[in-house]
Image: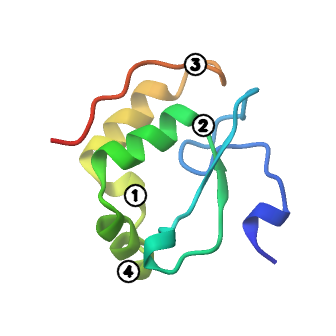
Amino acid sequence: MAADEIYSDTCWLCGRPLGRRVEWHHPVPKSRGGRETVPIHPICHRTLHAVFSNADLARFETEGTPLSAHPKIEKFLAWIANKPPDFHAPTHRRR
């Protein structure tokens, strides 16, 4: 059963409760053959795509490496941990 068939009430990346706005993220990008989707906060989704390319996301998933192990994501997760579910802030683009 695909993850999008079971609605979770927590964000796939940060584990905080979801708010009114929920986006669906492909852990393996569609461009790399991914079909499964997981619920995620918009700010978490934008952060993932600002930090990682689709190739990076696919590599992390196939290697089984947690995204939280990356220093930028680790820093983001510590910062967002105590924010309310519908918190939003501008996300910087990948350079």
- SS category of the residue bearing label 1: helix
As measured in the structure, the alpha-carbon distance from the residue carrying label 2 to the one carrying label 3 is 9 Å
Mark 3 or mark 4, which has the lower sequence index?
A: 4
Tag nearer the camera, 3 or 1: 3
Tag nearer the camera, 3 or 4: 3
Q: Do residues under tags 4 and 2 come within 8 Å of each other at their CB atoms? A: no
As measured in the structure, the alpha-carbon distance from the residue carrying label 4 to the one carrying label 2 is 24 Å
As measured in the structure, the alpha-carbon distance from the residue carrying label 2 to the one carrying label 1 is 15 Å
Return the mark for residue 63. Answer: 4
Return the mark for residue 41. Answer: 2
Please state the horizontal and vertical placement of residue 95, each as a whole percent of the image: 15, 41
As measured in the structure, the alpha-carbon distance from the residue carrying label 3 to the one carrying label 4 is 31 Å
Looking at the image, which residue is at 65% across and 63% down? Answer: 37
- SS category of the residue bearing label 2: loop
One can see residue 28 in this view: no
Looking at the image, which residue is at 50% across and 39% down? Answer: 44
As measured in the structure, the alpha-carbon distance from the residue carrying label 4 to the one carrying label 1 is 11 Å
Q: Badge 1, how many Cα within 10 Å: few under 14, some, many 20+?
A: some
Mark 2 or mark 3, which has the lower sequence index?
A: 2
Q: Which residue is mark 1?
A: 67
Vertical order, 57 against 46 (above or below): below
Q: Badge 4, how many Cα within 10 Å: few under 14, some, many 20+?
A: few
Vertical order, 22 against 48 (above or below): above
Amino acid carrying label 3: it is: Phe
Return the mark for residue 87. Answer: 3
Amino acid carrying label 4: it is: Glu
Amino acid carrying label 2: it is: His
In the image, 1: left or right of 35?
Answer: right
Please state the horizontal and vertical placement of residue 31, each as a whole percent of the image: 44, 72
Looking at the image, which residue is at 62% across and 74% down? Answer: 35
Instruction: Please tell me which residue lies in front, 61 or 25.
Output: 25
Tag nearer the camera, 2 or 1: 2
